[in-house]
Image (cartoon, rainbow, N blue to C red):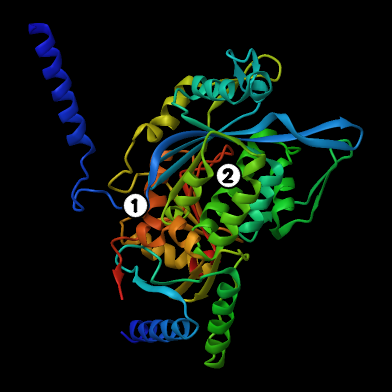
């Protein structure tokens, strides 16, 4: 399917961009088999709040150059940033928030890609 | 000697047992981290909102002690069932209206009074302030409502100024609280409870969107201090991603009028309404009730075709719908269609013939 291929390419691109800025523990989950309406999550940890903001800025700027803008989110948190690129939703978190909300634990059955 | 030997043996065996129990287990047995599957624990929670206390003319001095809005919420797996309890319900335990329970005996009396009225176990309580409700509504980006006629009310003493025009409105947290506090129409408190149900349904739906999670977590963290609850914030926040896929049903505890302004539980109707709370299953085949679809023409036609495949013939009606939901007086019949369309089930107090499925543009988002 074209859509799946596009999403997988986008995930690879997001992963590269996050690694460029030294994001930690970058994980992509395929949620299609375990959730009714979620497709893919990309999770990444930042070492500090400024690092979190840097990751968000970098990802947004680079993808915007390629014509991709995230859908607006409802509010900002100093520990958790969500960027919604349609079927791919990126969660950038501080390590504490990452462990606390444990999104990977909630979707433990999701396939890692 | 003999008793001493047996005492020694007992001591040795206890020591050995202690060693065995404290022995580090193999990694394959040790739970590294509780594996969650997204479902919430089974729990009965009394959720109430406190009104505002006035210590003088035009001088609100914080949350009051009366709880005008009381819900019994049952969490079970992916099901959230909430029962609205009218504020004027007479509670023998309280010796007055149930909305005075919190003032007279705190959360414990409120829980007991709700248990007495519903016959269901309330393990925990969560007493909100109007400010915290507004903050949560803001965190999910507000709510959409449709007013058939303008909503106007001024209570200078309570500093409550409501002035909403008719039509489709997007309300922020503060406005949504005003909309939910209004009870100056023909159906009074029942209409207010129906409005609260509508807002709750939307908040839960929006809370399922991962984009709202950071703001929602922040709002709960910021407002948690002003809440009275025996739930822990850690418990709630840890389960935030678990709201994904929750199914919500909302009903009102059936009552009949009594002396003065008191209401009494309608025992017969209560048993029917409560059956799904006590583990009633969703019917496996379409219930034989009239079904009406409301919404834009295109959505109604789609809905009719969708239902035809289930062998259900539904009437269509073009209407302005801001938020999709299923309305039914019967929880049993409503739950079948709520399940089929993956929509919240709202059991309003106002009469509904059969099942009404409202299809809005939010379905397409």
Residue B56, image quadrant: top right
Residue B84 image offset from top left, x and y in percent: 56, 34
Sequence-first tag of 1 and 2: 1
Residue B351, image quadrant: top right
- A81 lies above or below B354: below
* Residue at x-position 53% and y-position 28%: B254
- The N terminus of chain B: image quadrant: top left
User: Circle 2: is it few (<14), some (14-19), or many (20+) Cα within 10 Å?
Assistant: many
Q: Which residue is mark 2?
A: B197
* Residue at x-position 60% and y-position 56%: B218
How many circles with numbers are drawn on the protein? 2
Foreground residue among A12 and B343 = A12
User: Circle 1: is it few (<14), some (14-19), or many (20+) Cα within 10 Å?
Assistant: some
Mark in the foreground, 1 or 2: 1
Q: Which residue is outermost to the front?
A: B1
Residue B151 image offset from top left, x and y in percent: 77, 48
Q: Which residue is mark 1?
A: B36
Foreground residue among B218 and B197 = B218
Foreground residue among B360 and B300 = B360
Question: Judging from the image, what secondary structure is the residue with disc 2 in?
Answer: helix
Question: Judging from the image, what secondary structure is the residue with disc 1 in?
Answer: loop
Tell me the subunit letter for badge 1. B
Task: Left or right? Give the position of A109 relative to B117.
Answer: left
Q: Is residue B289 visible?
A: no
Q: Is residue B331 visible?
A: yes
- B221 lies above or below A10: above
Q: Which mark is residue B164?
A: none
């Amino acid at each position: 399917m074209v859509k799946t291929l596009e999403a997988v390419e986008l995930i690879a691109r997001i992963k590269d961009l996050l690694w460029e800025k030294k994001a930690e523990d970058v994980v992509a989950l395929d949620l299609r088999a375990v959730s009714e309406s979620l497709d893919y999550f990309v999770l990444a940890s930042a070492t500090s709040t400024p690092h979190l903001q840097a990751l968000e800025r970098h990802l947004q700027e680079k993808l915007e150059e390629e014509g991709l803008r995230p859908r607006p989110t409802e509010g900002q948190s100093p520990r958790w940033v969500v960027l919604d690129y349609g079927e791919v939703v990126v969660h950038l978190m501080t390590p504490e928030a990452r462990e606390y909300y444990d999104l990977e634990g909630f979707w433990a059955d999701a396939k890692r890609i | 000697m003999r008793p001493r030997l047996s005492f020694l043996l007992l001591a040795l065996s206890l020591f050995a047992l202690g060693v065995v129990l404290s022995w580090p287990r193999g990694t394959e047995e040790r739970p590294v981290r509780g594996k969650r599957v997204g479902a919430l624990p089974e729990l009965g929670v009394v959720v109430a909102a406190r009104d505002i206390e006035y210590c003088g003319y035009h001088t609100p001095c914080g949350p009051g002690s009366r709880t005008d809005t009381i819900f019994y919420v049952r969490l079970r797996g992916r099901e959230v069932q909430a029962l609205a309890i009218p504020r004027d319900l007479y509670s023998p335990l309280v010796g007055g209206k149930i909305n005075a329970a919190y003032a007279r005996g705190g959360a414990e009396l409120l829980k007991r009074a709700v248990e007495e009225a519903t016959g269901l176990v309330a393990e925990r309580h969560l007493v909100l302030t109007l400010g915290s409700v507004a903050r949560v509504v803001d965190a999910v980006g507000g709510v959409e409502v449709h007013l058939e006629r303008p909503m106007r009310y001024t209570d200078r003493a309570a500093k409550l100024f409501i002035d909403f025009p008719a039509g489709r409105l997007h309300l922020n947290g503060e406005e949504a609280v005003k909309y939910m506090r209004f009870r100056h129409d023909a159906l009074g408190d029942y209409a207010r409870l129906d409005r609260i149900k509508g807002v709750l349904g939307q908040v839960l739906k929006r809370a399922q969107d991962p984009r709202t999670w950071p703001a929602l977590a922040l709002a709960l963290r910021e407002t948690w201090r002003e809440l009275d609850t025996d739930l822990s914030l850690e418990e709630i926040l840890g389960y935030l991603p678990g709201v994904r896929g929750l199914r919500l049903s909302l009903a009102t505890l059936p009552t009949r009028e009594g002396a003065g302004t008191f209401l009494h539980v309608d025992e017969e109707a209560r048993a029917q309404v409560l059956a799904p709370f006590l583990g009633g299953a969703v019917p496996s085949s379409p219930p034989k009730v009239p079904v009406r679809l409301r919404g834009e023409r295109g959505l109604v036609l789609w809905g009719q075709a969708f239902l035809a495949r289930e062998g259900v013939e539904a009437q269509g009606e073009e209407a302005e719908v801001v938020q999709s939901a299923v309305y039914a007086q019967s929880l049993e019949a409503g739950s079948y269609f709520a399940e089929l369309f993956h929509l919240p089930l709202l059991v309003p107090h106002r009469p509904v013939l059969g099942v009404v499925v409202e299809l809005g543009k939010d379905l397409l988002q």
